[in-house]
Structure formats: C-alpha cells, structure tokens
Image: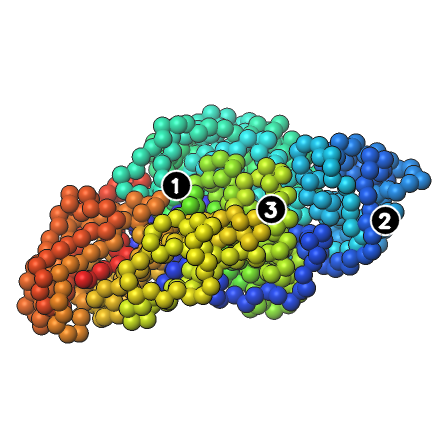
Amino acid sequence: MRARYPSSASGLTFKSLLTVLAVSLLGLGHATANSAPEKTAATALAPAYGIIPRPVSLTPKEGQFTLTRDTALVISDEKIRPAATLFRDLITPATGYILPVTTEAPAGPAIRLSLTKGGDNPEAYQLSVSPTQVSITASGTAGLFYGLQSLRQLLPVEIDSPAVINHTPWTIPAVEIDDAPLYAYRGLHLDVSRSFFDVAFIKRYIDFIALHKMNRFHWHLTDNQGWRMEIKKYPKLTEIGATRPETVIGHTINRDPHYDGAPVTGYYTQDQIREVVAYAAAREITIVPEIDIPGHASAMLAAYPEIGCVAKDFKVKTRFGVFLDNVCPTEEAFAFLDNIFAEMVELFPGPVLHIGGDEILFDQWQDCAPCTEIIKRENLEDYHGLQSYFIKRVEKLVQKHGKQMAGWNEILDGGINPSAIIYSWTGTQAGIEAAQAGHDVIMAPSRHIYFDQYESLNLDEPQSIHSITPLHEVYHYDPMPAELTPEQQKHILGAQGHIWTEYLRSPRRVEYALFPRLSALSEITWTPKDQQSWPDYLTRLDRYFQRLDLMGINASHATYKVYGEPVVTGRTLSLTLKVEGHDHAIRYTLDGSKPTARSPLYTGPLTLDQKVTVRAVGQNITTGALYGDYRQSFEPHKAMGRKITFASAPIVGENAHPQATLIDGLRATDRIFQLAEWSQWYDTDLEAVIDLEKMTAVSEVRLGVEAGQYRRLHPPKSISVMTSADNKTWRTVAQLNEAKIRASGPTVSLPFPAQKARYIKIIATKNDKVLSAQYEKMVPVSIFIDEIIVQ
Ligand code: ACM
Ligand code: ZN
C-alpha cells in the first residue's frame, strides 16, 4: 500500500499526496456534506423490509410466514444443498432449530429453493414469501445464496444472535422480491501484512462480505511489513519475512518515534489457504490474492536479498510508508517470481493474480548496473520504461500460469497491455483513462472507499490513517464515471473497499473501520441508482446496527456524531452543526465542558464573536444515547481577515488558502489532525508579514504548532516576532528558543510590551534534518502552523 501521508520527509510525496487526499475547502469538517447531491429518489422501505443492499424490486404483501422447527428447506437439486445447509446452520444458534434439508416436497409450509433453467445472470434471484410458503429461485447457486441472505434479513434481527432466543416468533413478512446486482465485481480487500489476522478472523471477514452479497475478497498477502503466505520452494519467505521484531507506536512519521518491542509474526500455511478458499467459495466469494512487487517488497527481500538490485541488509520494516527497496528486473528475479506464481495458482482457483505494482521508488534501480544494461538492451526511455518492462514480464508469467494479471493503477505508467486489470486507487482519473484504453477496471478511489480513513474528526475516534471518509462519502460515491462512453463503461467491472492495517491492529479495530461503511459500499455496487436513497438507507441502518450488535461486531456510530460547518465573517463565527443519522438531535456546550443529555439542544447556527470552544454530541431521540466528541475552537484576533504575505508560500490543502487556514480564527489543534487544516513549510523557514492596515495596539502573538491528537509534529527551532510602522524598519519584540517552544504545548505564546504597530513579522526557523526511515537519508522536517493569533 501507500504512504498516503505527506511527509515531513519529501516534498515529492507530499505533492502526489495532495491529489490523493482531495481535501475539502478549508478542511473544516465534512468533505462532502455539501457537495454531493442527495440520493432521495426511491421511497422508504418499511423497517421489516429493510434489506441492505436494497433490492431492485420489493413489493410488500399481506400476511407473514412463520418459521418453525418443522419448516423444511426443500431443494430442487443437490447443487443447492451446500447453500441450504449453510443457511440452516446460520439460524440454528438463535432458533435452536435444525431444519431438515430435503429433496422431498413435504405437505406443510416450506422454504423451497430451486435452480431454474432460464436467466442469464447466475447472481439474480426471485424471493417470494406468502403465509404458506417461501420460495427462492435463481439460475445459479450464487443467486440462491443471495436470496437466502435477503431471507435472513427479513427475519427478526434476533436471527443473528449467537444464543437461543425463545420469545421471538420467527416471522417473515410476505413479499415479492426480484433482484440482481448492478456490478459483477463487488469487492473488499484486507491487508494482512501490517497486521496479521488468524484464519478464524479471515473466515469471519468472509462472512461479512457474504452478508452484503459481495463476491470478491482481495487478500493483500505481502508488503514491506510482512510476507504471510507459505511458499514451499522458498521457506525463508515465511521463516524470515513473516516476522518483524516490533512496530512503531503512533503515527509512523511522528517526531521522536517510539517502538513497542512486540514482534508481529504469522503466516498462512498452504493448507490454511485452501481451507479459506473453500470457505469463501461456499459463500460465492472468489479470492483475488496479491503479492506486491516490485516495491512494497522489503519482507520478500529480507528473505531473499539476491532478487534485489543492491547489496543491502534488507529488513522487514517496523514502520509504515513507501520505502526504497525494490525487486530487481533481472532474469533471476523473474524465475523466482515464476516459481511463486506456480505455487499460488495451485492454491487460488480464481482467474486473477494481483501483482501490486504501486508506489515504486526508482533509487535502487538507478544504482544498479543490470538495470542500466536492460534499459539499453530494451531501448527503454527511462525508469518508467523499466517499470513497464518489469510489469510486462510479470504479466507474461501470470499468463503462462493461465491467469489474468491485475495491478494498482501505477502499472499504467510507462505503458501496459490492455489485458491487465487496473485497480484505480489514487482517484478516479486513472480508472477513467484505463477504461478508455480498453482495460477492465475496478474502482477503488481512496477518498471514497478506503475504510481505514477516519469516519469523523471527533476527538473520540481511535487513531486511523490520514484523511476522512464519512459514511455519506461512501454512499454518494458512484463507481461509474460519467466521462465514459457506454462502450467504455462496460470496462468498469465494479468497486472495492479497502482495509489497510497500519493502525488497525486488531479484529475489533478492523470491524470499527468496516462497519457500517461496508454496507454503503454494498448498496452502491448492488442497487440500481434509481433505487439508492440516502434517507431510506439511514433508516435501514437502525436495524442493521441491532444485527451487528447481536453478531458481536464492533461497529462505529460515527454517523451519529456531530460535524460542523464554520463560516467566519469579519470577527464573527457562524457555526452550523449537523448529524447524518436520522432521529438524532444535537446537544452542545460553549464552556468547554462535555455535553450531557441536559445541555442545550441545538436549533440553528450558533453566532459567536468571543473566544470559545464549542463541544457537541449527537443524541438518539428515542434512546437518549449520546455519541461523539465534536470540538471547534474559535478565537477572534487582530490579524483575522488582514493581508498576509510570505517570503515563501506554504503548502496548503487543495482548495485551501493560507489566509483562510492561518488567520481565520479557527483552531485545528482540538480535532483529529488533518493536513488540510495546517500550513506547511517543507524546506524553507516561515517568514510572514501581516498588514494590520492601520496602527493597532498589539501585545502578543501566538502560534498553533502541535497537532494535539495522534500526531507529534516537529515544532520550529526558534520563533521571533517583529513589529514595524512602515514595513521597512523592524524591531524584534519577542523571541523563543527550541527548549521553550517544546515546553509550551500546542500553542506557543510570545508576549511583548504593549505597543502600536501596523505590520507584524513572524519568523519561525526550521529544525535540523532527521533521518528518514523510508528514504534512508537526512531530510528536512516541516514546520506546521494552524493559526497565527495576534492580540
Ligand atoms: C495503495 O493504497 N498503495 C494501493
Ligand atoms: Zn485557522
């Protein structure tokens, strides 16, 4: 995977990152709440019919079917027995019933499952429930399996209880459903390299995919931080590559990094992989296995350094990010990969091998004589050409083993055959271009469907990676780019959600990241657009959350947390508070205390012109439960709205303006760190002049320098403040050295004797370079400032 953070370490990474993050205007709050049109066309389903993903067509009927211990599962064909048996076993814990699965038609009420001859989509199904019979018909076992998933969701939510429930009648409301998916590829990915998850959890994860009628599991088996698949010919891949001695604590590019001293070790044996493949197949899920090459390969190179380009003591990485280590494009390395593929195709019956191909740094290729020779021999233009040569050679191997190659969108760089499937992760543009060039495409844009990103900026969120992807953002993402012609649109096979596990170190954290965003993804990949409805989906979430609770799933309730839309005019803040979830009110305080059920009820925008910290929570109006910890600090000051000029301009988020982030009165220190809310100087000092427009009484400057939560930024080395009446003659009025800055906390104060001045100059100097773990060289450290406060 990806660096996806800006690094204090490289201007280059930072630049590409900005395109990836696509940060919101000022980065203050929701990336999308205003921008996406609401999906409201479809009418609401009554709660009892609240299936996710919403079926194509659902017609409620009179009456209900009651499932008893005598209800038989009648199958038309032995091919259906596995699906019927899975359903029987699924409902046994809650009902205590072991329903008979039979080919004999019984006299009484029954659930009939039949394979029909007609129909060209094996994933389509019809489900009909009357008071005397349930019937599911489909032309393929997949359709029957999905029909049973719908039936499961029509039963009372208690059906998903792990223990017998005696007081619930197992009724199913009468209905006619005619259903089929919008996209053929509905995927979910899991990174098992950064964190390792045992087979029991992998099976649970597959159950999650199956519940949502999704059909691909992209298993990211290798990366810099661990190789997780047994390869018999190369035992050191797991003897050496499956263990790292420790892991960085906190954000990987924090200042003064600490390590936990706890080894992470684990891999899947080939027998375990076969077991998982069979488990997935029984749930109509195909596994797309990935080994990530030529970059993201440190674990592999630690085991077999001879396939690298440079003589080096390669190590399984203990931090996260993009690293220099690369597999070399030599014949020896291709033979090595050939042998790995030979074992993989014996394990994974699916048609596709994913070979990664993302985020390649060329340094090691540039340092290697064979690479220079290959470039010359093959008449390649540059290192992008060499990358293209590498990927094309790999594709030949994959094809030799009878599979189709897939890769992340970087494999387009330098040219690649249209036979390769492209996973468009850096955004949607690569997917659009790939489809235009004739590639099949899986849409995977990080902004919309990377579920490892924060779901809200509330301070009670556990640490996640980088940016924010609220539920709303997922639901309103449309995998089909409008730019494509109907012919090109056929290349968009579907979409996939992602769980990268740098900061998701346990099953419970994975569940928190996944739910409920997975359900939104399932709906946008299954349900026709005219049946997608955000308000209706939100009402269906209530029952969905109850079901997740019963399944022991640690779901996030971020959708019930508050987000804010601050607008500053002059020295006044107008703060609109919102909550996505339906039936939720907002309680807030202005004195910095934690809101309770008795705090004031929010009824409309707050107008504030004094220093204040607004705190707010969402409240379920039925249960009274409170959610979240939203904060927005505001401090009116004398530089607000004035002109600011720089000796060298800071890097700011897309759409943002330094004026807006630095002197808008809004503080970013009291929320989850988002790059977009900060101004950054990467390889220059900060030197800014603020024109107060007239002689003004001033006595203090303060700077926000520390993120406050989950990020430890490098503060400046020294700060000085100067005043002037004419922008020519300057007087230094305050100075702080590094020790004092470090001791000050998130906001550094520089008081000075009260005086009148028209111009204020702030100089903050950079700290010393640090050794970058990724780039293995000394790199500058950035200065980050969220606000310059003048009083
Ligand atoms: C990725 O996130 N680098 C595919
Ligand atoms: Zn600000």
Q: Position of residue 127 (x, y in %)?
A: 79, 51
* Real-space CA distance between mark 1 and mark 2, rounded to the nearest whole angstrom: 57 Å
Relative to residue 20, is residue 349 depicted above or below? above
Q: Residue at x 45, y 65 (%)?
A: 604
Q: Could you tell which of marks 1 and 2 lies nearer the N-terminus?
A: 2
Question: Which type of secondary structure does the marked residue at label 2 adopt?
Answer: loop
Amino acid marked by disc 3: Phe
Query: For mark 2, does the 10 Å Cα neighbourhood hold few (<14), some (14 to 19), or many (20 or more) residues?
Result: some
Q: Position of residue 426 (x, y in %)?
A: 46, 55
Residue 534 in view of the camera? yes
Q: Could you tell which of marks 1 and 3 lies nearer the N-terminus?
A: 1
Q: In the rendered view, does 398 fall on the left or right side of 754?
A: right
Badge count: 3
Q: Could you tell which of marks 2 and 3 lies nearer the N-terminus?
A: 2
Circle 1 sits on which residue? 320
**To which quarter of the image does residue 148 belong?**
top right
Amino acid marked by disc 1: Phe
Circle 2 sits on which residue? 131
Q: Residue at x 38, y 55 (%)?
A: 589
Instruction: For the residues labelled 1 and 2, say whether their Cβ atoms are less than 8 Å apart.
Output: no
Q: Nearer the viewer, residue 766 or 775?
A: 766
Q: Position of residue 401 (x, y in %)?
A: 62, 40
Instruction: For the residues labelled 1 and 3, say whether their Cβ atoms are less than 8 Å apart.
Output: no
Q: Position of residue 239 (x, y in %)?
A: 47, 25
Relative to residue 191, is residue 523 depicted above or below? below
* Real-space CA distance between mark 1 and mark 3, rounded to the nearest whole angstrom: 33 Å
